[in-house]
Image (cartoon, rainbow, N blue to C red):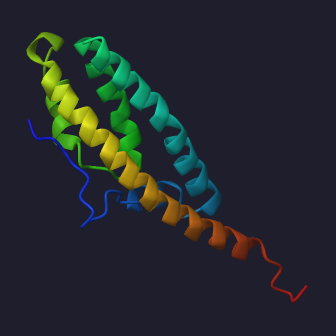
């Protein structure tokens, strides 16, 4: 199993999937990013609780749930890990694998949030420009 990690030398997010899905609509891009950002604390809380309780079955389920949120944001860092978790039964997995995954997930998501803030700023400016009355009023 590999463990994805946040590396500041490359972008964590690849926003092109979201832009295609949203047809470059600033409102939709901002909405989907907002939903993603609001989901992260819940995912982190679940991961931390399940780690604390050594609940591998629910760690596996939460990892599966996080997969779609990550893919919409173009965060492919964890594709191999998530595929690995999906291919194993809870009995075949161990807590250390999830500890590494959760640590990397949390640090990667912090970098992703910083990158998404830049996207939000850009799209807010674009949205404002699109809503401006270009007739000089």
* Residue situated furthest bottom in the rendering: 136
Q: Residue furthest right?
A: 137
Foreground pick, 98 / 31: 98
Residue 40 in percent (x, y) is at 45, 37
Picture coordinates of residue 70, whole percent (x, y): 36, 43
Please report the residue visible at 14 percent of the width from the left and 25 percent of the height from the top.
96
Residue 87, image x and y in percent? 14, 24
Q: Is residue 11 left or right of residue 26?
A: left
Q: Is residue 44 left or right of residue 25?
A: left
Q: Is residue 54 left or right of residue 27?
A: left
> Residue visible at 17% across and 13% down?
90
Quarter holding the N terminus is top left
Vertical comparison of 119 with 43: above or below:
below
Up the image or down, 5 lies above or below 95; here it is below
For the C terminus, which image quadrant? bottom right
Residue 20 showing in the rendered view: no
Q: For the point 43% across and 26% down, which residue is it?
A: 45
Name the image quarter holding residue 9.
bottom left
- In front: 56, or 134? 56
Image position of 70 with respect to 25: above or below: above
């Amino acid at each position: 199993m590999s463990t994805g990690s946040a590396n500041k030398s490359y972008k964590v997010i690849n926003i092109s999937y979201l832009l295609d899905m949203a047809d470059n609509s600033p409102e939709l891009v901002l909405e989907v990013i907002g939903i993603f950002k609001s989901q992260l604390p819940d995912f982190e809380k679940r991961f931390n609780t399940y780690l604390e309780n050594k609940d591998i079955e629910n760690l596996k389920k939460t990892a599966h749930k996080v997969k779609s949120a990550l893919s919409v944001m173009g965060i492919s860092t964890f594709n191999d890990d998530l595929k690995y978790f999906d291919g194993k039964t809870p009995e075949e997995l161990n807590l250390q694998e999830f500890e590494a995954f959760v640590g990397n997930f949390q640090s990667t998501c912090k970098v992703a949030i910083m990158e998404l803030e830049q996207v939000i700023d850009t799209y807010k400016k674009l949205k404002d420009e699109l809503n401006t009355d270009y007739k000089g009023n």
